[in-house]
Amino acid sequence: MAATSTALITQQPGTSWDTAWPQVTPNGVASQNLDLIQIVDEGQGVVLNVDHAGVVHNPASGATSGTRVGVFQTILASGNTTAHYFANAFANPSNLDILQVITPSAGSIAKYLDYLGVSH
């Protein structure tokens, strides 16, 4: 699936997930490696997470105590597909990519997370 011309949430300059959303601590000493996105159920339990490297985890694995982009809610219980969670958590009738990493020099799409929850 090709990337869309824009993203539902944000386009961020960079060449990788980590360069687009830097993971440096406030004191600049170590990486935090926070998730980019978490999808939580109605009880606030993390059912799916996209880690700092853009890897999608369903069921959630190693969810962090914060995110770089945000926490989004689903009414679905655990055990659903990634596509179901994304469709429920994001109002996205145009099926836009959720996130995109845009190369600063060329302006092309280096990485993207599509509407089905697949990381490219």
Image: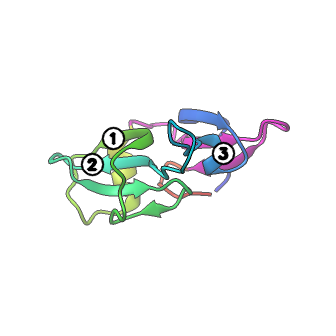
Q: Residue at x 63, y 41 (%)?
A: 20
Residue type at mark 1: give it.
Phe
> Which mark is first along the chain, 2 or 3?
3
Residue topped by disc 1: 72
What range of the chain is rendered magenta?
Answer: 91-113
Secondary element type, mark 2: strand
On the picture, is 35 further left or further right than 42?
Answer: right
Relative to 77, residue 108 above or below: above
Query: Are dots 1 and 2 in contact, CB under 8 Å?
Result: yes
Count all numbered tags in the image, as a single digit. Answer: 3
**Quarter occupied by the C terminus:** bottom right
Secondary element type, mark 1: strand
Q: Residues within 10 Å of mark 3 (few under 14, many from 20)?
A: some
**In the image, which disc is placed on residue 19?**
3
Residue topped by disc 2: 40
Q: Residue at x 56, y 46 (%)?
A: 29
